Image (cartoon, rainbow, N blue to C red):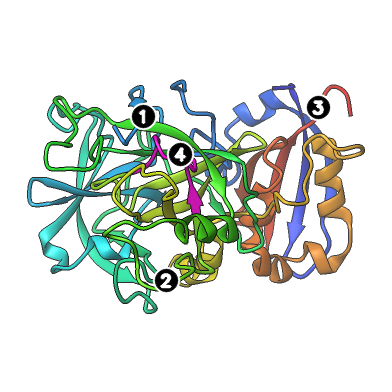
């Protein structure tokens, strides 16, 4: 990280302005009302997992590799996965919850189910919000928000995953990751063996039309009725030949994709036909169609606004600082906080520039103003 920061101000209803450049060490002076309220925009929530590349066909993950992964428990039993998305919120699958909220709790910092870590923290559930369009396994809307009774303290093994805005498109063929403690193959003796270590598997995305074509090929006893079972809010991941997939017990868990150094929650494990069968890839509920629904419950949650289908990393003239200047200095229609809310709020706007944004600061004495500190690259 370079030692020089550019500092911008952003005023509600007005156009940003450049205050000037300051050394990084300046923030070490705990100026009242500034540094004490200055928090990082990016931490391990969007960093590269610390692990390297049983879910079917997967490997043991390294401890702390996927810090947003949660275990949803019914009593003492692991029933589903989920993803931490904010200090009091988890996203999972709607079909994971068929009982009263008091029957469930959420474990964070979990790694081996039979060998609890000292960093494991358990939270009771305040409320469960299942999407109203959900009806049954295989239907649209298989997504739920879980509100925790108390906020989470983030650390090296507990951090939220970044969320994609509604404009984000995940391209077919993109290599993404699924994690969980589910079965290692389909059948009665398929349970993950002791000590039940978190599993990870890398799978490519499959577009909806291609996936429907696969599902219309051949037949299995558990096939969904009708043709084209993959709906608009779904995406598939896996291989036509099978071999790698999520399985029972992985439901609700994360499908995550890395883009431009950020990790995004692309989908939620939803359903499948058995596990890792040929022509039956795993099916996931996409996150972008539910960005507005999520923000309705969590107004402050930020969203990444890149559209992967059109964005090219390191494109000409798109240096981090150049991108920052373009967005902050373009025009009031793109820079006022009121307008910014339409693309994920001011944090959603700013977090999209994940190479250069370091910290956003609220100044109590100036309630209508934000201060933004951004790292200046050595070569622009």
Crowdedness near tag 2: few (<14), some (14–19) or many (≥20) residues, C-alpha within 10 Å: many
Residue topped by disc 4: 241
Q: Nearer the viewer, residue 26 or 44?
A: 44
In the image, residue 11 above or below residue 39:
below
**Secondary structure of residue under mark 4:** loop
Q: Is mark 2 in CB contact (under 8 Å) with mark 4?
A: no
Give the CA separation, mark 1 to mark 3.
Answer: 38 Å
Tell me the tag on residue 377: 3
Residue topped by disc 1: 58
Task: Locate residue 161, reporting x and y percent.
Answer: 47, 44
| 239 is within the stretch colored magenta | yes
| 74 is within the stretch colored magenta | no
Q: Earlier in the sequence, mark 3 or mark 2?
A: 2
Give the CA separation, mark 2 to mark 4.
Answer: 26 Å
Residue topped by disc 2: 140
**Secondary structure of residue under mark 2:** loop
Give the CA separation, mark 3 to mark 2.
Answer: 44 Å
Q: Nearer the viewer, residue 44 or 96?
A: 96
Q: Which residues are magenta?
A: 236-246
Tell me the tag on residue 86: none
Q: Nearer the viewer, mark 1 or mark 3?
A: 1
Task: Locate residue 136, reporting x and y percent.
Answer: 29, 72
Q: Nearer the viewer, mark 3 or mark 2?
A: 2
Residue 30: tell me if it is visible: yes
Residue at horizontal 67%, vertical 55%?
305
Give the CA separation, mark 4 to mark 1.
Answer: 15 Å
Q: Earlier in the sequence, mark 3 or mark 4?
A: 4
Dominant secondary structure, magenta: loop
Residue 301: tell me if it is visible: no
Residue at horizontal 61%, vertical 43%?
34
Q: Earlier in the sequence, mark 2 or mark 4?
A: 2
């Amino acid at each position: 990280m370079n030692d020089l920061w550019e500092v911008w101000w952003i005023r509600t209803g007005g156009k940003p302005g450049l205050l000037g450049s300051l050394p990084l060490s300046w923030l070490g002076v705990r100026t009242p009302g500034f540094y004490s309220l200055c928090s990082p925009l990016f931490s391990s929530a969007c960093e590269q997992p610390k692990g390297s590349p049983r879910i079917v066909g997967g490997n043991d993950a390294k401890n702390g590799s996927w810090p947003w992964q949660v275990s949803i428990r019914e009593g003492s039993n692991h029933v589903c996965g989920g993803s931490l998305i904010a200090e009091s919120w988890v996203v999972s699958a709607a079909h994971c919850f068929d009982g009263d909220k008091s029957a469930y709790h959420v474990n964070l910092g979990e790694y081996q189910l039979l060998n609890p870590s000292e960093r494991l923290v358990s939270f009771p559930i305040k409320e469960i919000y299942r999407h109203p369009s959900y009806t049954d396994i295989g239907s649209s809307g298989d997504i739920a928000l879980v509100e925790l009774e108390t906020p989470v303290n983030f650390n090296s093994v507990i951090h939220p995953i970044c969320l994609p805005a509604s404009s984000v498109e995940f391209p077919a063929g993109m290599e993404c990751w699924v994690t969980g403690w589910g079965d290692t193959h389909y059948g009665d003796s398929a349970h993950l063996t002791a000590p039940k270590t978190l599993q990870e598997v890398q799978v490519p995305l499959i577009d909806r039309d291609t996936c429907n074509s696969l599902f219309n090929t051949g037949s299995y006893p558990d096939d969904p009725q009708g043709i084209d079972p993959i709906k608009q809010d779904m995406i598939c991941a896996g291989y036509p030949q099978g071999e790698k997939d999520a399985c029972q017990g992985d439901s609700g868990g994360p499908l995550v994709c890395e883009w431009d150094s950020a990790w995004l929650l692309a989908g939620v494990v939803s359903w499948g036909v058995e596990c890792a069968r040929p022509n039956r890839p795993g099916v996931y509920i996409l996150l972008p169609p539910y960005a507005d629904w999520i923000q309705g419950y969590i107004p402050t949650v930020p969203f990444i606004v890149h559209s992967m289908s059109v964005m090219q990393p390191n494109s000409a003239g798109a240096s981090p600082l150049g991108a920052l200047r373009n967005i902050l200095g373009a025009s009031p229609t793109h820079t006022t906080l009121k307008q910014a809310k339409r693309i994920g709020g001011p944090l959603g706007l700013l977090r999209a520039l994940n190479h250069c944004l370091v910290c956003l600061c609220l100044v109590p004495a100036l309630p209508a103003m934000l201060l933004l500190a951004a790292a200046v690259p050595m070569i622009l």
